[in-house]
Amino acid sequence: MKKYGYVRVSSRDQNPDRQLDALKGLGIDSRHTYLDKLSGKDFSRPQYRKMLSKLRKGDKVVIMSIDRLGRNYNEILEQWRVLTREKKVDIEVIDMPLLNTDSVREGLTGVFISDLVLQILAYVAETERAFIRQRQAEGIASAKKRGVRFGAMKTEDPANLSEYYEKWKRGEVSLRGAATELGISYSLFYRRCQELKKEEEERFFK
């Protein structure tokens, strides 16, 4: 029996260290740990698929929390079925041991209980998201009736942004380093660099 760890963060800016440290603490070899930096809206993830191809009957997949598998109710249940029924592997959820399907320790009763708990949790989470979307829509509609206008205000760029853009192009400073010195977020500086680069390309090809 082999233990495999699966880690997912929603974007390249999020830090997976907490999940990786937890898996390492359980003695899971880094060679058997798979990390995706992608959205949880579906299961088209290269590392997840790679892990699936390695699984054999009796193996165990360890995840930090159930939402690492995804956020969609039906997809989570489907992947749970694939892992436990088709692949015939166990699942260990670090943040919620009640979901663990360790068939050696619990037998069929443990698998049944974990499946039941999962369905309840997934349903509650999906229902709560639907309520949140509904409340947001109602709030926006109400605000519009009161004349509230929506739309983010454009952040004022630092006066020396172009200077740091040129430094970044020459390799004199990293994106994060430049953003820190300018006092703006990494994502904003990166976005402005892409805009400036596009403007340069448009002028070049005119």
Image (tube, rainbow, N blue to C red):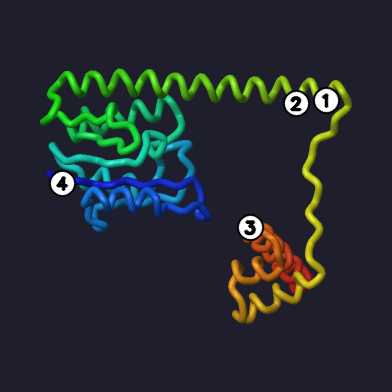
Measured Cα–Cα span from mark 1 to mark 2: 6 Å
Neighbour tally class for label 4: few under 14, some 14-19, many 20 plus, Cα within 10 Å: some
Pointer 4 or 1: first along the chain: 4
Query: Horizontal placement of 87 versus 205: left or right?
Result: left
Dot 3 corresponds to which residue? 187
Neighbour tally class for label 2: few under 14, some 14-19, many 20 plus, Cα within 10 Å: some
Measured Cα–Cα span from mark 4 to mark 3: 39 Å
Neighbour tally class for label 3: few under 14, some 14-19, many 20 plus, Cα within 10 Å: few
Which amino acid, by three-letter code, is at mark 3? Ser
Residue 75: x and y, percent? Answer: 40, 29
Dot 4 corresponds to which residue? 2
Neighbour tally class for label 1: few under 14, some 14-19, many 20 plus, Cα within 10 Å: few
Q: Circles 1 and 2: CB distance less than 8 Å?
A: yes
Query: Horizontal placement of 98 versus 202: left or right?
Result: left
Which amino acid, by three-letter code, is at mark 4? Lys
Residue 178: image tag: none
Measured Cα–Cα span from mark 3 to mark 2: 27 Å
Dot 1 corresponds to which residue? 144
Which amino acid, by three-letter code, is at mark 1? Lys
Q: Nearer the viewer, residue 164 or 182?
A: 182
